Image: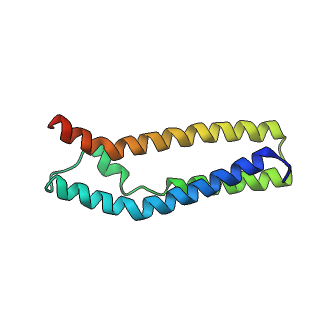
């Protein structure tokens, strides 16, 4: 495990496991709290479409495990794995930003009065 990409993939896998476990426990409670606050009114489409699909961190874990395995085997060159790692980080940050923005959309609609 001399490669930096191996450690980065391991760190990302651990972070994704933590995030997946955290979302598994908090998202249902958060959804029911929002339903109680809004009095049963339907939520925005984006918010209702994100709550059931909290499996995306597990996809990140699987991808990171594949990255660790490839890094340990040394199959692709180190520069290829670094590029894959950067693309994966950008994609995951986009998904994390969009999902957290959707988690806060109900509060924005409450503040705006819609």
Where, quadrant-wise, is the C terminus in this rendering? top left
Residue plotted at (61% across, 40% down): 89
> Where is 53 relative to 80, above or below?
below
Q: Is residue 41 left or right of residue 61?
A: left
In the displayed structure, 111 sits above or below 52; it is above
Number of numbered markers: 0
Apparent side of residue 77 relative to residue 99 in the rendered image (left or right): right
Residue 66 quadrant: bottom right
**Residue 37 place in picture, x, y as percent:** 18, 54
Q: Position of residue 67 (x, y in %)?
A: 72, 51
Residue in the image at 77% along x and 50% along y: 6
Nearest the viewer among 63 and 11 is: 11
Work out which quarter of the rendered image holds the N terminus and state it: bottom right
Residue 13 percent coordinates (x, y): 64, 55
Q: Quadrant of residue 65?
A: bottom right
Q: Is residue 52 left or right of residue 18?
A: left
| Residue at 18% in and 34% down | 112
x 19%, y 42%: residue: 110
State the image coordinates of residue 41 (x, y, percent, origin top left). 15, 52
């Amino acid at each position: 495990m001399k490669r930096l990409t191996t450690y980065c993939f391991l760190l990302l896998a651990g972070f994704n496991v933590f995030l997946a476990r955290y979302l598994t426990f908090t998202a249902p409670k958060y959804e029911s709290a929002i339903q109680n606050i809004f009095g049963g009114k339907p939520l925005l489409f984006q918010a209702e479409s994100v709550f059931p699909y909290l499996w995306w961190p597990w996809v990140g874990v699987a991808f990171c495990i594949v990255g660790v395995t490839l890094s340990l085997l040394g199959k692709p060159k180190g520069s290829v794995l670094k590029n894959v790692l950067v693309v994966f980080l950008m994609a995951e940050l986009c998904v994390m930003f969009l999902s957290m923005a959707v988690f806060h959309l109900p509060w924005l609609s409450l503040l705006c009065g819609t």
